[in-house]
Image (cartoon, rainbow, N blue to C red):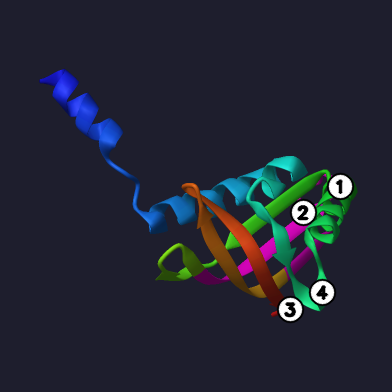
Amino acid sequence: MALSLLALTACSRTPPEQRLRERIGQMQAALEQRQARGFMEGVAEDFAGNGGMDRAALQQMVRAQVLANADIGVVLGPAEIELQGDRATVRFTAMATGGGGRLVPDRAGGWKVTSGWRDEDGQWLLHYAEWERL
């Protein structure tokens, strides 16, 4: 009986929306842990963002924030997810804080984000993002 349950569990596939939410959570955690590489694992090679930003520019921006802030906090608002097959659009708000490791953050900002994702071999990758200050 236990082997049958184990086999069924192994064969079940995590729903796409749940996998996408998990990916977003992993990327959020990577930022909070100041792990730029972990964050970038979720970004597609052909990423495009505000003002023509490409993947390399995004990576530099993330690295700069990691170097500039001993502490990084990220709070995401509820995500509105629209699935379209192996693609998804996710809209949310984000509040970010950073600073030198003191109890009160030195900096804080909020953004409204619209992001585009695609599922490649079971992994959701961010391929587009647009953000504006709140």
Instruction: Using the image as rendered, state which of residue 42 and residue 30 is in the foreground.
Output: 42
Q: Amino acid at mark 3?
A: Arg
Q: Which residue is mark 2?
A: 104
Q: Earlier in the sequence, mark 4 or mark 2?
A: 4
How packed is label 3: few (under 14 Cα within 10 Å), some, or many (20 or more)?
Answer: few
Question: x and y percent of residue 107 in the render?
Answer: 82, 62
Q: CA distance from mark 2 to mark 3?
A: 21 Å
Q: What distance separates the C-alpha of mark 1 from that of mark 3?
A: 23 Å
Report which residue position mark 4 lands on: 52
Q: Look at the image and tell me in which quarter the C terminus lies.
A: bottom right
* Mark sitting on residue 100: 1
The residues bearing labels 4 and 2 have C-alpha atoms spaced at a distance of 34 Å
The label on residue 133 is 3
**Amino acid type, residue under disc 1 in the picture:** Gly
Query: Between tags 2 and 1, which lies in front?
Result: 1
Residue 34 location (% of width, % of height): 75, 42
Secondary-structure class at tag 1: loop
Check whether the beta carbons of the residues at disc 4 and disc 2 lie within 8 A of each other: no
- Magenta range: 89-109
At x 79% / y 55%, what residue is drawn?
Answer: 98
Disc 4 residue type (three-letter):
Gly
What element does badge 4 sit on?
helix
Instruction: Identify whether 8 is placed above or below 115.
Output: above
